[in-house]
Each structure stands twice: as structure tokens, then as C-alpha cells.
Image (cartoon, helix red, strand yellow):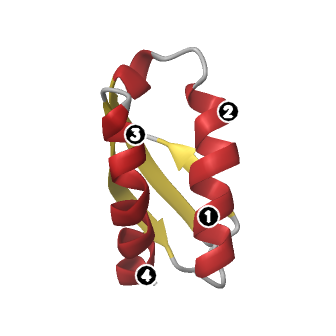
Amino acid sequence: MKEQVQHVIDQIRPILQGDGGDIQLIDVDEKTGIVTVALQGRCGGCPHAQMTLQAVVERKIKEVVPGVTAVQRA
């Protein structure tokens, strides 16, 4: 599961980097399906970071990786 999540994050990363930010995978809890990520650069302090996390990152990971229940910030 962790490799699948990392693959999706690698696809999302250029979008965030284009806005001066980045994303790093911190953990995948396979029992609960919770993915923990760190938003970095401009994304780390952006007032829209939570919206980006849910609308872009969480949605895409859930579409591709079965078993993921939520994505949260570290």
C-alpha cells in the first residue's frame, strides 16, 4: 500500500512544486488506512492547504489506492 501511495504522491508533486510547495509521505497505517503527509514550502503555510489536501491529495489517493480512508497532515 505504501508504494502505491508514494506513486500517487509522485504524480501530485509537480503540481504543488509549480506553486512553490511540495509534499512528503510520512506514514501509511495499513490497519486504519490513514496516510500522513507533510506539506512543505509555500504549501506548508498556505491558508488553502487543508483544501488542497482534501480536494487534490486525498481524493486522488483514494481513487487509486484501495483501503485508504483519510489523508492527514503531520
Contact between marks 2 and 1 (CB within 8 A): the answer is: no
Q: Mark 1 or 4, which is nearer the eye?
A: 1
Q: Residues within 10 Å of mark 3 (few under 14, many from 20)?
A: some
Q: Position of residue 1 (x, y in %)?
A: 46, 84
Q: Disc 4 marks which amino acid? A: Gln
Q: Residues within 10 Å of mark 1 (few under 14, many from 20)?
A: some
Q: Residues within 10 Å of mark 2 (few under 14, many from 20)?
A: few
**Residue 45 image-quadrant placement:** top left
Return the disc, 2 or 3, that comes first in the chain's sequence.
Answer: 3
Q: CA distance from mark 3 to mark 4?
A: 19 Å
Return the disc, 1 or 4, that comes first in the chain's sequence.
Answer: 4
Return the disc, 3 or 4, that comes first in the chain's sequence.
Answer: 4
The residue that label 1 is drawn on is: 60
Secondary structure at badge 4 equals helix
The residue that label 4 is drawn on is: 4
The residue that label 2 is drawn on is: 51
Look at 58% across and 14% down and name the residue there.
Answer: 47
Which label belongs to residue 16?
3
Classify 64 as above or below 18: below
Any part of residue 71 in sight: no
Q: Disc 2 marks which amino acid? A: Met
Q: CA distance from mark 1 to mark 4?
A: 11 Å
Secondary structure at badge 2 equals helix
Secondary structure at badge 3 equals helix
Q: CA distance from mark 4 to mark 2?
A: 22 Å
Any part of residue 23 in sight: yes
